[in-house]
Amino acid sequence: MKECKNILHGIASVFLDGADIGYTEGGVEVEKGMDTFDKLVDQELDACDIAVTQYTMIVRTSLAEATLENIKRAWNEAAVITTTVGPPQYRTLTFGIQQEIPEHTLKFVGSSPEKLNREYNFRRAKQISSSAHTLQKGDKVVVPVEFRCLPDFTKPREEQYGWVDDYES
């Protein structure tokens, strides 16, 4: 039986390495994908079976707070944000090229159909996509960010990406 009460809506809070990264624009998208291989044989007109060849777990959002800290996260910058006492006073994020992509824990909290908190937790996440923002009259500045969640091989197979909890406040 279909139940409208099971349709989710609402906002989410996003945490990277335990720190709240502020407001988001357009919500949070979670995608669990897989690539498959068709097991074909000459004697059958369709596949006998399919096998999984790769899984992927992606989390996407746009950060509505265009702080230096969020730009640093979205651009995988390793540099420390520095403050120069003035006048004038500067906060500076340098950016450059690095070989390593930093690894993070990722969590976001929204609502479940039962009006409980729904918390998604990912053990290993790395920012993987290009991230551009526009400074333009009449537009909000948002910083898109996309994380590739990776398995934690120290956990059992069914727990390697993370978990989802529903709980009361």
Image (cartoon, rainbow, N blue to C red):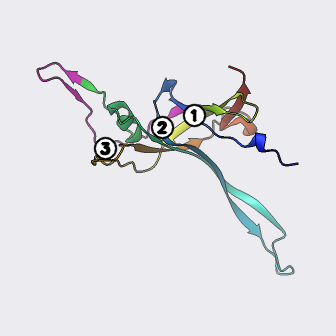
Q: Nearer the viewer, mark 3 or mark 1?
A: 1
- In terms of depth relative to the viewer, which is nearer, 87 or 46? 87
Q: Which residue is mark 1?
A: 12
Residue 31 position within the rendered picture, expressed as x and y whole percent measured from the top left: 62, 49
**How far from the left and from the top, in percent, is residue 80?**
31, 27
Residue 115, quarter of picture: top right
In the rendered image, the vertical position of residue 45 relative to residue 146, given as above or below: below
Left or right of 5, for residue 16: left
Total marks shown come to 3
In the picture, measured across the screen, residue 103 lies left or right of residue 88, that is right
The residue beneath circle 2 is 24
In front: 135, or 76?
Answer: 135
Q: Residues within 10 Å of mark 2 (few under 14, many from 20)?
A: some
The type of residue carrying mark 2 is Thr
The disc, 3 or 2, on the residue closer to the chain's N-terminal end is: 2
In the rendered structure, does residue 98 fall within the stretch colored magenta? yes
Question: Mark 1 belongs to which amino acid?
Answer: Ala
Point out the stretch of residues depicted in magenta: 83-108
Q: Quadrant of residue 88?
A: top left
The three-letter code of the residue at mark 3 reads Ile
Which element type, helix, strand or loop, lies under badge 2? strand
Q: Nearer the viewer, residue 157 or 121?
A: 121
- Are the two marked residues, 2 and 1, in contact with CB atoms closer than 8 angstroms? yes
User: Which residue position holds label 3?
Assistant: 97
| Residue 53 horizontal/vertical position (percent) | 69, 58
Does label 2 or label 1 sit earlier along the sequence? 1
